[in-house]
Amino acid sequence: MRHFFSVLGGMGTLATESYIRILNQRTPAKRDQDYLNYILVNHATVPDRTTYLLDHKQQNFLPDLIEDVQQQNLLKPDFMVMVCNTAHYFYDELAAASDVPFLNMPQETVRALQKRYPQAQRIGLAATQGTISSQVYHKYIADAGLTEVDPTPAIQEKITRLIYQSIKEEQGAVDPTLYHEILSDMMRDLKVDVIILGCTELSLAQELAPNHQYPVADSQSIIADRTLELALELRRA
């Protein structure tokens, strides 16, 4: 197979399915051969990212992901993309291990946010506690001259409940009321201009419950668009 890319997924599986689904839906295709060539690595047994980031005595997930990158190197994809925000804590290490370009979801999200919401200054970050505490997005938001606004403990509890109990434990059973409540709380209590959905489970919630008026920058939707753009460029080359 020529002109293909590798997707490091399974963190979690239902969120990865959402990425693949929207990627395929947005691909301009009228026949089978118009779709993109890709390899999906649904590595569901990667240790929980937040668990490690909150307590480094727990099992580190980096060795599993390095192994995935090394295995994909042997297949010689055009580029790699990893659909898990929290795992980007180790972006530098993974990009260094890759023989090909390795897309950066937080960086791409902030870039797209600036284009879509050029007047935004206060950026709310809805994400796992691991992403928040390890400041996965902080550098990219700060480098853009923007202000990151993290959830209050009360809002973070709701985010964690939506990610782990509503979606992960209930196999994608998104609670739309809870999701919309989180967005409302962040806009009202944190006085933010736009909210980054910095967890792919929240992206799944956005896919399944998009009927709200709150401005969001959906990291998974954005990285799907960037994946599609780059894959089509390489196909035409």
Image: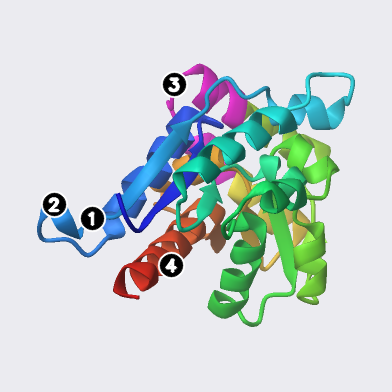
Nearer the viewer's eye, disc 2 or disc 3? 2
The local crowd at label 1, few if under 14, some if 14 to 19, many if 20 or more residues have their Cα within 10 Å, is some
Residue 1 position in % (x across, y down): 30, 49
Foreground disc of the pair 3, 1: 1
* Among numbered discs 3 and 4, the one appearing first in the sequence: 3
* Residue 175 seen in the current view: no
User: Which residue in the structure is indicated by mark 1?
Assistant: 35
Task: Assess whether mark 2 and mark 1 are in contact (beta carbons under 8 angstroms).
Answer: yes
Q: Looking at the picture, which amino acid does disc 2 mark?
A: Asp
Answer above or below: position of 217 versus 95.
Answer: below
Left or right of 187 in this view: 1: left
Separation of residues labelled 3 and 1 (CA atoms): 27 Å
Question: In this figure, which residue is indicated by the disc labeled 4?
Answer: 230
Q: CA distance from mark 2 to mark 4?
A: 19 Å
Assess whether residue 182 is covered by the magenta stretch.
no
What amino acid is labelled 4 in the image? Leu
229 left or right, relative to 177: left
Q: Earlier in the sequence, mark 3 or mark 1?
A: 1
Quadrant position of residue 187:
bottom right
In the rendered image, residue 224, in percent from the top left (x then y), is placed at 44, 56
* Magenta-drawn segment: 162-181
**What residue did someone put label 3 on?**
171
> What residue do we see at 64% from left, 45% from top?
85
Q: Which mark is residue 32?
A: 2
